[in-house]
Amino acid sequence: MTPAQRRLLELCSSPRTFSELKRLTKLSDSGLSKVLKEMRELGFLQKLQEGYLITTEGMEALGHRKIRAHGVILVYSGISEEQARRVCEILRGSPKFWLSARSEDVGDYDVRVGLALTFPELLLDQVRGNSKEREVK
């Protein structure tokens, strides 16, 4: 994967428009179009009404791991497969949800890394303002 492709995937952890990506990557229109096309053909990005969004395959390409267990898709990094399976088991049977978690000492690094359950349609609900967030203490 080229540095431009990696950067693009990292930027698309939430939907990004072509204009946003052009501004953030400083690529030309044709250069950005080429990379976006390549990433979509590989299945790493999807084009949505709100913009371009990384897929679970794209997350895997960045080095995150994916597991399907108990009706849950878990994309994760930094934990063992056994821990990931236990998380899936705990969440088995839960209604549609989206979750992002990380250890406190990771800092501001937030591209759905650490532990992330990814359901793109629910992420879009969050982007569109349809989700209800609450802090758990």
Image (cartoon, rainbow, N blue to C red):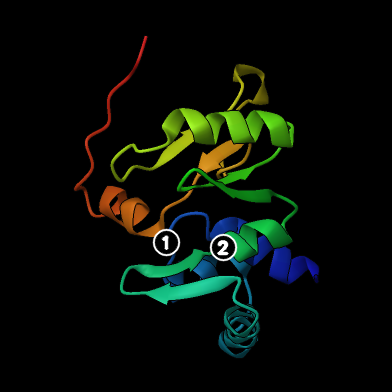
**Camera-side residue: 119 or 35?**
119
| Residue 15 point in image, percent of width and height | 42, 61
Quadrant containing the C terminus is: top left
Circle 2 is placed at which residue position?
A: 24
Relative placement, left or right, of 48 versus 10 is left
Q: Using the rendered image of the protein, determine whether residue 101 is visible from the camera's viewpoint.
A: no
Residue 70 against residue 28 in the figure, above or below: above
Residue 46 against residue 103 in the figure, above or below: below
Circle 2 — which element? Answer: helix
Q: How many numbered dots are placed on residues in this image?
A: 2
| Separation of residues labelled 1 and 2 (CA atoms) | 13 Å
Circle 1 is placed at which residue position?
A: 15
**Camera-side residue: 119 or 112?**
119
Q: If you read the primary sequence from the N terminus, does the residue marked by circle 1 or circle 2 appear first?
A: 1
| Residue 107 point in image, percent of width and height | 62, 25
Q: What residue appears at the point 59 percent right and 86 percent down from the top-left corner?
A: 37
| Residue 72 point in image, percent of width and height | 47, 46
| Residue 58 point in image, percent of width and height | 63, 64
Q: What residue appears at the point 64 percent right and 51 percent down from the top-left corner?
A: 66
Q: Residue furthest right?
A: 2
Q: Are marks 1 and 2 in contact (CB under 8 Å)?
A: no
Identify residue type, mark 2. Answer: Leu
Circle 1 — which element? Answer: loop
Residue 39 against residue 80 in the figure, above or below: below
Q: What residue appears at the point 78 percent right and 66 percent down from the top-left corner?
A: 3
Q: Indicate the quadrant where residue 8 lies.
A: bottom right
Quadrant containing the N terminus is: bottom right
Relative placement, left or right, of 133 versus 110 is left
